[in-house]
Image (cartoon, rainbow, N blue to C red):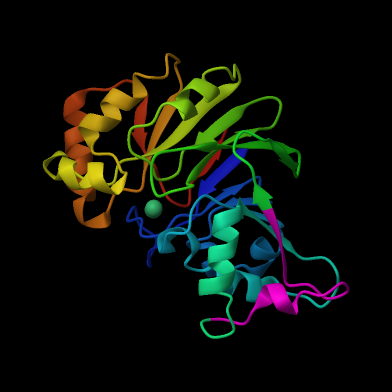
Amino acid sequence: MRVELLPSSLPVSDAQFLVSYLVNGAVAVDAGSLGLLADLRRQERVRHVFVTHEHIDHIATLPIFLENVYEPGPDCVELLAAEGVLDFLHRDIFNGRVWPDFFALSTGDDRFVHGTPLVPGTPFTRAGLTITPLPVSHVDGSLGLLVDDGRVAVAFPSDTGPTDDFWKHIATCDRLQAVFLEVSFPDEMADLAAVTGHHCPRSFAAEIRKLDRDVRWIVVHRKARYAGVIARELATLGLKHVELVEPGRVYEF
Ligand SMILES: [Zn+2]
Ligand SMILES: [Zn+2]
């Protein structure tokens, strides 16, 4: 399985402002920076976009991406998200004001987008991947994803603070090799992390102990302003198997 966290800064750097992962080039997890890929063919290869929640860093370029890849005809991109998130995208983004109503414009023979509601705990098979959405602890209805190709599995808890069911579920997956887990704030902002459903290094350290498995813990979603402090605090904790994500690197599992 190939996983890339798409860069979201110019020039490309470790700074992460937006969230989009590409899995095997065909499935996107979130669409923060998906529409910024300079190579349009790479955008066109993405046929399924899973949206974990509605925060702008996760959907920022979704409208641009859908416009970039639109071709007249019945084939279109599939947007997979919780029912509430699909409603929100329709009402507040694709509403004919902020952006055209791609849902209403999608008729039988000519479609911009097709929405598929995700049901927590119900796996979906797309592009050879079995993807299970699982509840996490962020805004209401936020979903993390377990992505399994039958040989290896990788987990994307997306934005979350301390949570339990997600870890219980993925602990049963023997193929699990890596988890892309967030650390948004430094320890001195632990209170803010707690009320906004995010991690700081200390809560991250407690969290990874919930999964009794040797997996790679790849740290994502450091607020750019605090990225250096977070890296130093994580290093001080001396945790095993923890690394900082490199945006634009293709991880092979
Ligand atoms: Zn969020
Ligand atoms: Zn976020």
- In the picture as drawn, the residue positioned furthest to the top comes out as 212
Residue located farthest toward the left when viewing the structure as drawn: 188
Q: Residue at x 61, y 33 (%)?
A: 121
Residue 38 seen anywhere in this rendered image of the structure: no
Indicate the position of residue 170 as horizontal and vertical percent values.
53, 24
Question: Residue at image x 63%, y 26%?
Answer: 152
Quarter of the N terminus within the rendering: top right
Magenta residues (range): 99-116
User: Which quarter of the figure has residue 193?
Assistant: top left
Residue drawn where x is 29% and y is 31% of the image: 204
Horizontal side of residue 84 vs 127, given as left or right: left
Residue 83 position, x and y percent, is: 61, 54
Magenta residue check for 225: no
Q: Quadrant of residue 205?
A: top left
Q: Is residue 244 above or below residue 66?
A: above
Does residue 160 appear left or right of residue 249 in this picture? left
Report whether residue 201 is seen: yes
In the image, residue 28 sits, relative to residue 186, either above or below, namely below
Q: How many numbered marks have been drawn onto this rendered protein structure? A: 0
Given residues 145 and 97, the one toward you in this image is 97
* Residue at left offset 47%, top offset 52%: 248
Q: Quadrant of the C terminus?
A: top right
127 left or right of 173 in image: right
Q: Residue furthest right?
A: 109
Q: Position of residue 19 (x, y in %)?
A: 45, 55
Residue 59: x percent and y percent?
50, 63
Q: Nearer the viewer, residue 65 or 168?
A: 168
Q: Among all residues in the image, which is located at the extreme bottom?
A: 97
Residue 100: in magenta span: yes
